[in-house]
Image (spheres, rainbow, N blue to C red):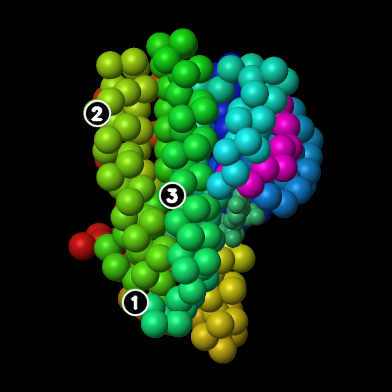
Amino acid sequence: MSNATAIVTGAARGIGAAVAQRLAQDGFAVAAVDLDDSTATVESITRSGGRALAIVADVSDEAQVTEAVARTATELGPPTVLVNNAGVGPRAALVDMTTEQWDTVLGINLRGPFLFTRAVVPYMIDAGWGRIVTMSSISATGDAGRVDYGSAKAGLIGFTKSLALQLGPHGITANAIAPGFIVSDMTRLSARRLGLEFEEFQRQAAESIPVGRVGQPEDIAHTASYLVNHAAGFVSGQVIYVAGGPVD
Ligand code: NAD
């Protein structure tokens, strides 16, 4: 169990909500940050006896990020764990992709983790300890329908490895989780865009996954819990594919 404070972005639903709940079970006080209201996540944590705070903020907005981190420090304590999870993944062919879409996707998926990490790392350096976990994706290896998303998720791997090199001497580890198909609103939306029932979409996806099933948010929460644990201090700069099989 830990008494430290963790920030989880994109914690209103899906993977982020599961990570926030799991870290609260692990004993962290959790700031659940999202563009949407994270009250449901916070209520489920407090019902189970945990400590949590809902903060509405856009991860791509510098002033909102600064404010969210300062509020976390004041209300829950100095944050020493950061899970950069908020993300969006709209689909568009390259030739139809607007510059605005590119900027938005890179802004949320890549600039967001930069802004949050820059704001939280001083607390980690003060503490001489920290854990940074960033949500990449199997799309980092290429995504035919999402050039912008694939670029951002690949960028996060370079970001993570660079953080691990720079911050290791301060007792801070940085790792990326690269999920495969996880049941969430993001994959629900993909099914709708492809004109498939969600059940059918999951069945088709599971056929090409070695363990024979799609992933659940809890699969990712379990991996995040491992990476932020004190005992994982020798694991840094890694990309852990949580995809039911190997990924090239
Ligand atoms: P989701 O759409 O269910 O949840 C994403 C959350 O991020 C939402 O609560 C949303 O409100 C929040 N968010 C979006 N833009 C934001 C912003 N600008 N500021 C703050 N919050 C914002 O998606 P999910 O499946 O839970 O995805 C979580 C992360 O995992 C994302 O980074 C995604 O790219 C990654 N991922 C998901 C899958 C998958 O199959 N679901 C696979 C690989 C990677």
Q: Which residue is mark 3?
A: 110
Residue 70 in sight here? yes
x and y, in percent, of residue 78 in the image:
58, 17
Do labels 2 and 3 touch, CB within 8 Å?
A: no
- Amino acid at pointer 1: Ala
The residue drawn where x is 63% and y is 36% is 63
Q: Secondary structure at mark 2?
A: helix
Extent of the magenta region = 51-59
- Amino acid at pointer 2: Leu
The residue drawn where x is 53% and y is 76% is 190
Residue 165's tag is 2
Q: Which of marks 1 and 3 precedes in the sequence? A: 3
The residue drawn where x is 45% and y is 56% is 106
Q: Secondary structure at mark 1?
A: loop
Question: In the drawing, does residue 165 fall left or right of residue 84?
Answer: left
Q: Which residue is mark 1?
A: 144
Some atom of ligand 1 lies within 8 Å of the CB belonging to the residue at label 3: no
Label 3, residues with CA under 10 Å away: few <14, some 14-19, many ≥20: many
